[in-house]
Amino acid sequence: MPESREQLIVFTRYPEPGTTKTRLIPLLGPEGAAAFQRRMSRHALACALRLAAERGTSIEVRHEGGTLRRMQAWLGPQPLFRPQGRGDLGRRMADSLSQAFAAGAERAVIIGTDIPGISPAHLAQAFDALGRNDLVFGPTADGGYYLIGVRAESFRRGAPYLEAHIPWGTAEVLRQSFAIARAAGLTWATLGRLADVDRPEDLPAAVKTLSAGAPASSLSVIIPALNEADRIGATLAALPPAAGVEIIVVDGGSRDATAA
């Protein structure tokens, strides 16, 4: 049972090297791409846990890959962990919402973990918007959305914006979702637009955003590098995260993709 009438559902993937953030592998390598996935997921969960502390929202993590033990070893025992299940993204989101409402939630919000700019304020705004609307969306810069929220009474009347044949992963997702919601007579609100991280060119802004929100460091680890594009990702992935520690890679004029 949800601990409150609000439930936040975090969609993520267990960061197995070679299966996560595959479009970043040419630049970061399998280990580096998985490490960046871990970093973004920890940021999203930290925002979720802060929201829970501030307003009592229940938190659930829906994951692809991994096991309960591996998820708890990675993110800790506090959230409720459940597999995302089968089907396309729309079906998996619909199933998670259905279970949340069946357990007593009145408002539910789903977020992804590849949005470095997301904050507890975005999540609070989403739940507040559901007090006046059937739906809430958080648009991404590439035409999709990083957040969708639904009221229980609206969901029970049907969820065509999830069940229709929406081309997930394309620039048409949000536009088609709006059109379907409009045809169904549903009202919605939108949050501020944020950038997600899918391609190598998304990385510089993502790193800057994540670093801006990080706590002050008491220890800096400096790694000199020169033409290490093939190995730097694995090196960074091998360093365990620790509070108050920052990792600085100093490039000595590499002619490959080390700096990127």
Image (cartoon, helix red, strand yellow):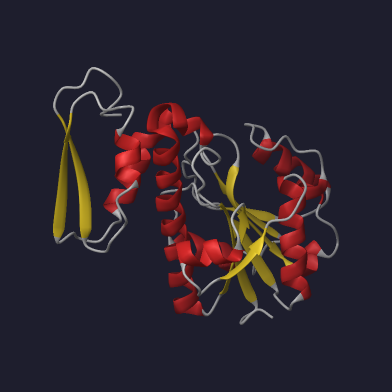
Q: Give how far across and how far down residue 17 sits, in percent.
A: 49, 42
Question: Camera-side residue: 133 or 141?
Answer: 141
Please, which residue is most extreme toward the top here? Answer: 255
Location of residue 170 in the rendering, given as x and y in whole percent from the top left corner: 64, 32
Image quadrant holding the C terminus, namely top left
Q: Quadrant of the N terminus?
A: bottom right
Q: Which is more toward the observer, 77 or 50? A: 77
Q: Residue at x 29, y 51 (%)?
A: 239
Q: Is residue 250 something one can see in this rendering?
A: yes
Q: For the point 56% across and 75% down, which residue is it?
A: 57
Q: Nearer the viewer, residue 110 or 122?
A: 110
In the displayed structure image, the side of residue 77 where residue 161 appears, left or right: right
Q: Residue at x 47, y 48 (%)?
A: 115
Residue 215 or residue 17, whichever sits in front: 17
Instruction: Judge whether 142 appears above or below 81 on screen.
Output: above
In the image: residue 84, left or right of residue 146: right
Q: Residue at x 31, y 57 (%)?
A: 241
Q: Is residue 97 left or right of residue 33?
A: right
Q: Is residue 199 visible?
A: no
Q: Residue 119, how many percent across, how many down?
A: 43, 59
